[in-house]
Amino acid sequence: MPSYSIGQAARLLRVSPETVRRWADGGRLPMGRDGSGNRVIDGFGLARFARERAVDDERGAVGDSPPTSVRNAFTGIVTALTVDEVVAQVEIQAGPHRVVSLVTREAVEELDLAVGVTVTARVKSTSVHVDRS
């Protein structure tokens, strides 16, 4: 099982190393020591913590919205919008992720989309490619 340093865990969780230390010191994130005495987080524990955080974030973001089968939701801000007669391209920056979607012009008008508006992109796909970092 791989183990991660505080800095590596912070980058993966998109938080500061100090936040990871506080979580560990508060007992929220299990941490041990490697053979050199450095603080490390085992991969299994980090994966479990990331999953729990994502569920908590999803619950907080969903609020009173209707239930959905789509689990891949990216809340972000519209950074670019290109609209023509029939179709529109919407670019969203959701944290470190850039999501680009093609929708109808009618959808853009109904949702009152514009650069700077907060939106949630929901992705459902039958084909997902995974590359190892």
Image (cartoon, helix red, strand yellow):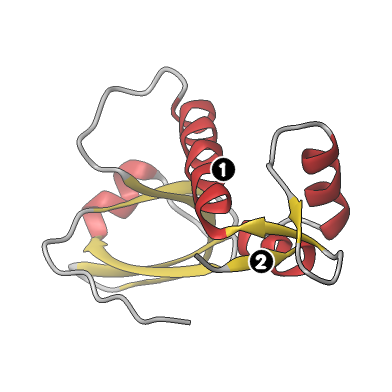
Task: Give the residue at the far top of this rendering.
Answer: 64
Compared with 131, 88 (above or below) is: above
Residue 49 has which mark? 1
Mark 2 or mark 1: which is in front? 2
Foreground residue among 94 and 28: 28
Q: How dense is the environment of label 2, judged by Cα within 10 Å: few (below 14), some, or many (20 and up)?
A: some
Left or right of residue 94, residue 132 in this image? left
Quote the CA–CA distance across marks 2 and 1: 13 Å
Residue 77 x/y as whole percent? 55, 56
> Which residue bears the numbered disc 2?
4
Above or below 124: residue 85: below
Residue ID at (51%, 36%)? 52
Q: Earlier in the sequence, mark 2 or mark 1?
A: 2
Query: Mark 2 and 1 residues: CB-CB less than 8 Å, in contact?
Result: no
Q: Residue 103, image x and y in percent?
A: 24, 61
Rendered view: 64 above or below 57: above
Q: Residue furthest front?
A: 35
* Quadrant of the rendered image containing residue 67: top left
Q: Local crowd at mark 1 within 10 Å, few (<14), some, or many (≥20)?
A: some
Camera-side residue: 99 or 79? 99
> Tag 1, which secondary structure?
helix
Q: Amino acid at mark 1?
A: Phe
Residue 27 versus residue 133: which sits nearer the camera?
27
Residue ID at (31%, 66%): 101
Res. 108 mark: none
**SS class, disc 2:** strand
